[in-house]
């Protein structure tokens, strides 16, 4: 490093002896290429970089530095919120009852099909900013409220545009099999996806117009059955997409077993997963993306997080942000995971960082504070990192800085003048 090559330094004065799931951190130096140049004790780092010129120094005395949070499951591109359905849910209507009455996904699909690309991008941008300000530095973003090729591509173009212009990491997911379009059978929808949607995605990928990372299917009774799901996922795998799909949410479908068999990177939801499915996922290193907001808001039984962890399944967390589960905050997701799914705070933090990065195929570059990894960090206004989970809904007074690729992308000046306690 030299004066002509400015870098970024972070100093952290964490309480030594405190249990910290990512190791003790004295200082971190972030180089201009956006990667972490060094991690270690403050005096060692100061000596190592004694001749360097720094663009900025942040004194983190009394604060904690954490890896940027990773949200492994969101549906953030859509028009047409469903606030009017919330009262129906509170009165006892089930997810499928609302869906069969023409609400749910189909309500949002109609509005999304009618929205312009610019309208979708503007709302998507604001949602990403709210996620980022709550500590998320890498987010999985799905399509899925189009169901026809034209609208699915419109959504994927919006996600691609955000990838290129926003200061937050994005892993994009094609989720055209989110529901069966009106007027089609599941078999007809499956054939359309395999014969029309996926070849077009392959063409756009080769031309460099759209880069999709994952493929998702809603494997559920009354939506896409196991065989349709298998066909779509295999076709997606054949064009190089990672398999990362919805399964075993409302009914036991043997989705976990299917994911293990096909080499899926992850299966989401899993409220109704079988014991055999858990065992198969552990053996196949197929991660479980658990969504405590969904179980909470739909009053479903909680996923068996403890059993999965005890059996060696890689457990990740996601907000499942969508019109049905309107939550931007991974700190709140971690809190719900600890209280309702009996995860420890260490387990929840790992599930919202390194394990969620694994789900997106990014654990070699994201999810922990290590030399050579991307400089995505969250600095919180507390000497104990556990406050980020302990304070339910308190992240707005706790998150002081969010850093992506070594650059401050969010600075909460209120943290300098107010106590987080």
Image (spheres, rainbow, N blue to C red):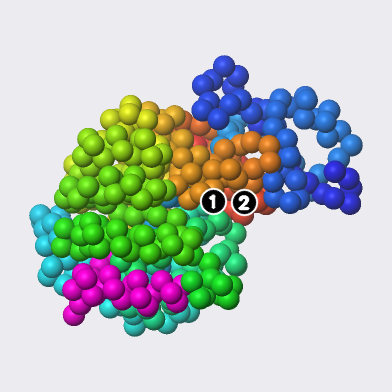
Residue at 43 percent across and 62 percent down: it is 238
Residue where numbered disc 2 is placed: 404
Where residue 373 appears, as percent x and y from the top left, is 64, 43
* Residue neighbourhood size for the residue with mark 1, other residues' Cα within 10 Å, grouped as few (<14), some (14–19), many (≥20): many
Task: State if disc 2 and disc 1 touch (CB < 8 Å).
Answer: yes
Up-down: is 41 above or below 111?
above
In front here: 248 or 333?
A: 248
Query: Is any part of residue 214 visible from this angle?
Result: no
Q: How many marks?
A: 2
Q: Does residue 183 belong to the magenta stretch?
A: yes
Q: Quadrant of residue 237?
A: bottom left
Where residue 51 appears, as percent x and y from the top left, is 89, 37
Indicate left or right for 309 with 249 as reference: right
Residue where numbered disc 1 is placed: 137
**Magenta segment, which residues?**
178-201
Up-down: is 294 above or below 187?
above
Where residue 232 appears, as percent x and y from the top left, is 33, 64
Residue lying at the far top in this picture: please name it.
17
Residue at 36 percent across and 35 percent down: it is 283
Residue at 54 percent across and 51 percent down: it is 137
Q: Does residue 116 belong to the magenta stretch?
A: no
């Amino acid at each position: 490093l030299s004066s002509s090559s400015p870098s970024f330094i972070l100093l952290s004065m964490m309480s030594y002896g405190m249990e910290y799931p990512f190791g003790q951190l004295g200082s971190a130096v972030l180089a201009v290429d956006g990667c972490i140049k060094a991690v270690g004790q403050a005096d060692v780092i100061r000596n190592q970089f004694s001749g360097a010129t720094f663009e900025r120094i942040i004194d983190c005395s009394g604060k904690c530095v954490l890896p940027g949070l990773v949200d492994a499951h969101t549906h953030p591109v859509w028009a047409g919120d469903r606030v009017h359905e919330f009262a129906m849910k509170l009165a006892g209507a089930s997810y499928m009852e609302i869906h069969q009455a023409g609400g749910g996904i189909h309500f949002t699909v109609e509005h999304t099909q009618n929205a312009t690309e610019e309208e979708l991008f503007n709302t998507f941008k604001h949602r990403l900013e709210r996620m980022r300000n709550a500590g998320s530095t890498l987010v999985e973003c799905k399509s899925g409220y189009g169901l026809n090729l034209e609208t699915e591509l419109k959504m994927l173009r919006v996600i691609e545009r955000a990838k290129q212009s926003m200061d937050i990491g994005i892993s994009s997911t094609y989720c055209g099999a989110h529901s069966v379009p009106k007027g089609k059978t599941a078999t007809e929808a499956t054939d359309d996806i395999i014969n029309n949607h996926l070849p077009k995605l392959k063409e756009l990928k080769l031309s460099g117009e759209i880069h999709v990372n994952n493929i998702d299917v809603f494997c559920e009774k009354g939506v896409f059955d196991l065989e349709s799901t298998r066909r779509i996922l295999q076709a997606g795998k054949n064009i190089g997409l990672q398999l990362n799909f919805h399964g075993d949410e409302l009914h036991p479908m043997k989705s976990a077993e299917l994911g293990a068999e096909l080499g899926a990177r992850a299966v989401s939801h899993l409220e109704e997963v079988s014991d055999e499915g858990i065992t198969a996922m552990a053996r196949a290193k197929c991660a479980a993306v658990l969504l405590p907001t969904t179980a909470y808001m739909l009053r479903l039984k909680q996923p068996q997080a403890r059993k999965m962890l005890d059996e060696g399944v890689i457990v990740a967390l996601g907000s499942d942000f969508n019109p049905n589960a309107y939550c931007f905050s991974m700190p709140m997701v971690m809190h719900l995971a600890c209280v309702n799914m009996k995860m420890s705070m260490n387990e929840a933090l790992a599930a919202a960082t390194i394990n969620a990065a694994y789900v997106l195929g990014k654990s070699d570059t994201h999810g922990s504070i290590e030399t050579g990894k991307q400089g995505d960090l969250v600095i919180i206004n507390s000497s104990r990192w556990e406050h980020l989970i302990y304070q339910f809904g308190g992240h707005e007074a706790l998150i002081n800085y969010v850093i992506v690729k070594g650059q401050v992308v969010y600075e909460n000046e209120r943290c300098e003048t107010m106590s987080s306690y």
